[in-house]
């Protein structure tokens, strides 16, 4: 499959999924929107993956590329009805572009956390063989507060009631990070906005130890990501 990837910061890429996709013979075409790269003809691609970033969905004046990105997501899901995978900001953009609502949380959710599959999530083919409790890495200060039309919540926790969602049959969003590798925490800790939320949520000392805290959990994260990836492509026929 030809996979179109929207990125909003070079260090927030498809991570471990890129390795899975290469192994399966799929190809990635990455568009770095924050660097001014244009959105190509959507018709030429089979799947759209939208990654994270330090900006928020409503910051269209500061990041004018958000408007065409949302229009592309809306067309992709509503008109072309092709497979969509959104992570963190990509999850929020899916909701916002299709008429849902995204807003600030009372406090950022950063670090290790568990999410629980909803009843809909437990029966969704994407989570076959997973859960009902999923260990995750969180790093966000905004959340989807209202689902878009046709949206269904698949996972939740007390900090954030919409941790995963599906729109229609082929568009999925995940607030938490499944794509991480052993370099992710270190790379993201260099981003001022991410460092601020990290220290606000965990305190300076725990924030400085996050990479070491996360490291023992990476094999479980990889196993879950691999299963989600396999289920996703099985569901979309890829």
Image: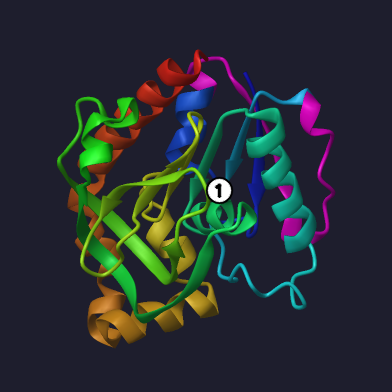
Q: Residues within 10 Å of mark 1 (few under 14, many from 20)?
A: many
Classify residue 1 as left or right of residue 108.
right
Classify residue 4 as left or right of residue 131.
right
Q: Residue 172, how many percent across, how many down?
A: 46, 40
Quarter where residue 41 is shown? top right
Instruction: Look at the numbered disc 1 and give the secondary structure of its residue.
Output: loop
Counting the numbered discs, the total is 1
Q: Is residue 29 magenta?
A: yes
Quarter where residue 97 is shown? bottom right
Residue 12 makes an appearance in the image: no
Quarter where residue 175 is shown? bottom left
Q: Is residue 232 magenta?
A: no
Q: Write the residue at 54% across / 59% down.
A: 100
Magenta span of residues = 22-43
Is 153 located above or below residue 64 in the figure?
Answer: above
Q: Residue 227, how many percent across, how many down?
A: 30, 27
Residue 214 makes an appearance in the image: yes
Is 129 located above or below residue 121 in the figure?
Answer: above
The residue that disc 1 covers is 13
Q: Write the residue at 52% across / 78% down.
A: 193
- Of the pair 83 and 222, the residue shown nearer to us: 83
Q: Residue 238, how many percent across, how many down?
A: 52, 15
Q: Residue 68, how many percent across, how many down?
A: 79, 55
Q: Write the residue at 24% across / 84% down.
A: 205
Q: Write the residue at 46% across / 34% down.
A: 17
**Image quarter of the N terminus:** top right
- Of all residues shown, which one is farthest toward the front? 149
- The structure's colour scheme is rainbow
């Amino acid at each position: 499959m030809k996979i179109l990837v929207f990125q909003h910061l070079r260090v927030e890429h498809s991570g471990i999924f890129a390795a899975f996709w290469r192994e399966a013979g799929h190809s990635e075409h990455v568009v770095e929107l924050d660097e001014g790269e244009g959105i190509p003809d959507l018709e030429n691609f089979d799947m759209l993956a939208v990654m994270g970033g330090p900006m928020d969905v409503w910051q269209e004046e500061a990041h004018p590329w958000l408007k065409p990105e949302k229009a592309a997501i809306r067309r992709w899901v509503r008109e072309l009805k092709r497979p969509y995978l959104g992570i963190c900001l990509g999850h929020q953009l899916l909701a916002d572009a299709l008429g849902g609502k995204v807003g600030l949380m009372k406090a950022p959710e950063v670090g290790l956390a568990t999410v629980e599959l909803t009843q809909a999530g437990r029966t969704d083919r994407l989570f076959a063989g997973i859960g009902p409790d999923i260990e995750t890495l969180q790093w966000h200060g905004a959340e989807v507060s209202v689902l878009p039309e046709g949206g269904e919540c698949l996972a939740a926790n007390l900090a954030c009631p919409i941790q995963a969602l599906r729109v229609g049959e082929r568009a999925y969003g995940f607030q938490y990070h499944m794509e991480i590798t052993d370099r992710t925490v270190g790379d993201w800790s260099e981003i001022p906005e991410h460092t601020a939320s990290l220290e606000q949520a965990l305190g300076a000392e725990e924030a400085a130890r996050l990479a070491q805290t996360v490291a023992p959990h990476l094999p479980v994260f990889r196993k879950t990501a691999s299963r989600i990836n396999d289920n996703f492509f099985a569901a979309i026929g890829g």
